[in-house]
Amino acid sequence: MTINLKMTISLLLVAGTLVSILLHGCKPLKEFYHFPGYKGVTILPMKPPAYDPAKKTVFIIADNAGTELFDMMAPFYLFNLTGKANVYLLAKDSSPIIMRKGVFVLPQLTFAQASQMQLQPAVVIVPALSPMDIRKQDPQLLRYISHLHTDSTLFLAVCQGALTLAATGLYDGKPMTTHASELSSIRKQYPKTNWVKNVTYTTAGNLYSTSGVSNAVDGSLMVINKLFGEGTMQQVMSAIHYPHTTVPQHHDSRVIGSAAKWRIARKIFFESNKKIGLLLENNLDELTIAGILDTYYRTFPAAVNSYTMDNLPICSKFGLTIIPTGNIVKDKPDELHMPGNMPDSVLAQIRSKKITVVSYNNGNDYIINTCLRRIRSQYGTRFQGVVEEMLDYNK
């Protein structure tokens, strides 16, 4: 073999390796930033929301074009746990909400329907919605939120929901926080708001806000405390196995920096990028669904989807119609996370497809901590820390 031929073969091998590495890394990057719309048949809510005039009413605002999963589902679950609130998920229209990421969710009411019912919320919660800067805010949405304001209405901005609520002007001159990695950018867009960092939540009269993603729980607990009292808040904390005895005010606002980005790059290009699935079943609670999907989404998997055994929607614990995004047979996920109790026959069927089943048998742990421990065992302590930074989570 000539020297030139050897060199050519070596260069081809190097080129092939580089192409393979790039293709390996492109899947998780595409998955992270791609939020496909719903293309299935028209689905009606599986459980119409009830109304009890003796209870306080809570509106959680969603954007059909895109809403952050944990930001939305955690408050929905916590306020329902109180047993003292009518909790409604609202959106502009009745089409499935594109969630970030892993499920579609049907709104329970449209803005127009809520107005026709003459519902007056005691609490309005705004999670991170699809508009990511001041130029893309939806005027109709802003008008609707502003219309809900009264002197007694409590408002809670979760994570980048701060973008939307700051755009209403309600927080002008008031303290507000958001995800640590977005605070600097958002401050420039809304200079009239008093932006603060290193806090879990802010409060100014009836106006609340939280740090990023995971802090939806903390902010919800503080509003529950104000609305229903310390005793109810403690009951909810116990029910979800909240990892603190009180809601911490101080927050270590860690920006996702260059070291974290290099660790992400190393993972997606040189380590395992699994196809992650969550198996849904009726009565599964909203916090567990959001906790698993949102935490694993931030590991940059090759894919993240939800499934049901019959490919039909499920009704969650507190009545949300949740639509799976994938098909187990077609997608062949590497891992299937199963927080519910499936029959042995179903488990055998899944394992026969050579899918790793991840069970959640420890019911006495906070769901984010459960996920983070497993991520540490898979990718190490540093990558676990990166996921925590992306969730803006302080243990």
Image (tube, grey):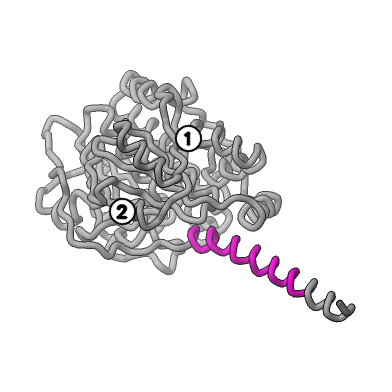
**Location of residue 337 in the rendering, given as x and y in whole percent from the top left corner:** 42, 40
Residue 17 forms part of the magenta stretch:
yes
Q: Which of 345/325 is in front?
A: 345
Res. 140 image quadrant: bottom left
Residue 172 marker: none
Say whether residue 124 is visible. yes
Mark 1 secondary-structure assignment: helix
User: How many numbered circles does the render carry?
Assistant: 2
Residue at point 41%, 47% (across, down): 353
Query: What main secondary structure does the magenta stretch of the protein show?
Result: helix
Label 2 neighbour load within 10 Å: few <14, some 14-19, many 20+: many
Most extreme residue toward the front is 1
Identify the image quadrant of the N terminus. bottom right
Residue 104 marker: 2
Q: Amino acid at mark 2?
A: Phe
Q: Point out the stretch of residues depicted in magenta.
A: 11-32
In this picture, is 308 found above or below 366?
Answer: below
Q: Which of 200/143 is in front?
A: 200
The numbered mark, 2 or 1, whose residue comes first in the sequence reads 2
In this picture, is 241 found above or below 371?
Answer: above
Q: Which of 75/184 is in front?
A: 75
**Location of residue 231 in the rendering, given as x and y in whole percent from the top left corner:** 33, 18
Q: Amino acid at mark 1?
A: Ile
In this picture, is 165 found above or below 2?
Answer: above
Q: CA distance from mark 2 to mark 1?
A: 21 Å
Residue at point 46%, 55% (across, down): 303
**Location of residue 253 in the rendering, given as x and y in whole percent from the top left corner:** 59, 42
Q: Which residue is mark 1?
A: 368
Most extreme residue toward the right is 3
Identify the image quadrant of the C terminus. top right
* Left or right side of 213 for 330: left
Residue 31 forms part of the magenta stretch:
yes
